[in-house]
Image: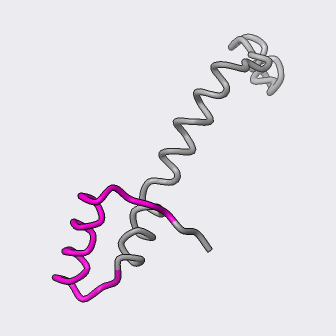
Amino acid sequence: MLAIRLPDAIEKRLGALAKKTGRTKTYYVREAVIEHLEELEDIYLSLDRLEKPAKRWSLEDLEKEIDLDR
């Protein structure tokens, strides 16, 4: 279960959309989260990796690892 607070303007827009379409506000919030969660994960995980760099490989190292000459 998740409870969120939204700015009044967003709450009103969401309520108006729900009323016009006959769907619930919960439906539209769920749809928005599903639609954008992967994008947010990509952004924040990328930023985290930039701040905490791990091992990096050169192209030459990768080619040796997968042995492209077979």
Dividing the image into 4 quarters, which one contains the C terminus?
Answer: top right
| 13 sits left or right of 42 in the view | left
- Dividing the picture into quadrants, the one containing residue 17 is bottom left
| Residue 33 locus on image (x, y percent) | 46, 61
Decide whether residue 6 is among the magenta residues.
yes
Instruction: Tell me which residue sits at (48%, 46%) in the image.
Output: 39
Whether residue 54 sits left or right of residue 33 in the image: it is right
10 in relation to 59, above or below: below
Toward which corner of the image does residue 15 lie, by quadrant?
A: bottom left
Q: Is residue 15 left or right of residue 70?
A: left
Q: Which residues are magenta?
A: 4-24
Main secondary-structure element of the magenta-colored stretch = helix
- The vertical placement of 33 against 58, above or below, is below
Residue 52: image location, x then y, percent = 73, 20
Residue 31 % position (x, y): 41, 69
- The residue drawn where x is 72% and y is 18% is 53
Q: Does residue 67 lie above or below 39 as drawn?
A: above
* Colour convention: one colour
Which is nearer the eye, 26 or 44? 26
| In the depicted structure, whether residue 33 falls above or below residue 69 | below
| Left or right placement of residue 50 versus residue 32 in this view | right
Please tell me which residue is depicted at 73% across the width and 10% down the height of the picture. Answer: 60
| Quadrant assignment for the N terminus | bottom right
Q: Nearer the viewer, residue 64 or 3?
A: 3
The verdict on residue 38 being magenta is no
- In the depicted view, which residue is nearer to us: 62 or 5? 5
